[in-house]
Image (spheres, rainbow, N blue to C red):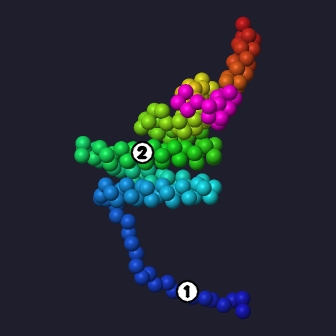
Amino acid sequence: NENQTINIFIHLISFERFPEIYSMSIDNLYNFALKHKENANKFFQQKNYFQAFKLYHRSLCYALNFINEQPTDEHNEILENFNQLILSIYSNMSACQLIYGNNLNVIDNCSSALEINPTYVKALYRRGYAYSNLNDYELALKDLQLANKIQPNDEKIESLLKTTKQRLEEYNKILGKSLKNFF
């Protein structure tokens, strides 16, 4: 019959609450950050970029909590591990943002990654790509030329570098014609 009612009762057997982020040990912060990043990578590979981004962001929250604690000299090795993890997370977040065309966020995330490692080629490439998408060809060229210098003969970098140079030339021609009309 179509008008039947079904009652379902759920009995919660257990519930595990994650510890508050500010009270977690350094090891737990790192392990949680790494776990979320690895899960995000799986979603990224499945082309579920939205879910991947959410998990990268959560991973970043765990990792940055350690950095915000003002680590001491005894934490130098751990700090390097966190920095490498954070660098990777920012880069991966920018990859998600690039897919959705969120160029300003790509620039922010790549800039954060480049604060950690100014010669990180993926971040230079992605930021250059985003600048190019925003028609800021001079900043794009600056990043892409540095990426090309660090990693010469990379086809993706060289291709985008060539395209960006062509776009800048076209832009300058149009700008030149427009300025002639003013005088």
- x and y percent of residue 83 in the render? 39, 44
Q: Of circles 2 and 1, which is in front? A: 2
- x and y percent of residue 113 in the render? 46, 39
Q: Earlier in the sequence, mark 2 or mark 1?
A: 1
Q: Which residue is mark 1?
A: 8
Q: Which residue is mark 2?
A: 84
Point out the image quarter for the C terminus: top right
Which secondary structure class fits the magenta region best?
helix
* Residue at the spot 30% in from the left edge and 58% down from the top edge: 25
Q: Is residue 91 left or right of residue 100?
A: left
The residue type indicated by label 2 comes to: Gln
Residue 140 image-quadrant placement: top right
* Residue at the spot 63% in from the left edge and 46% down from the top edge: 99
Residue 73 image-quadrant placement: top left
Point out the image quarter for the N terminus: bottom right
Per the image, label 2 sits on a secondary structure element best described as helix
Badge 2: residue crowd in 10 Å (few <14, some 14–19, many ≥20): some
Per the image, label 1 sits on a secondary structure element best described as loop
Q: Nearer the viewer, residue 104 or 122?
A: 122
Q: Which residues are magenta?
A: 149-164
Q: Is residue 87 magenta?
A: no
**Where is 123 relative to 161, above or below?**
below
Residue 149 appears in the picture as rendered = yes
Question: Can you tell which mark lies on residue 59?
Answer: none
Q: Is residue 153 magenta?
A: yes
- Count of numbered labels shown in the rendering: 2
- x and y percent of residue 166 in the render? 71, 24
**Where is 119 relative to 73, above or below?**
above
- x and y percent of residue 39 in the render? 51, 59
Badge 1: residue crowd in 10 Å (few <14, some 14–19, many ≥20): few
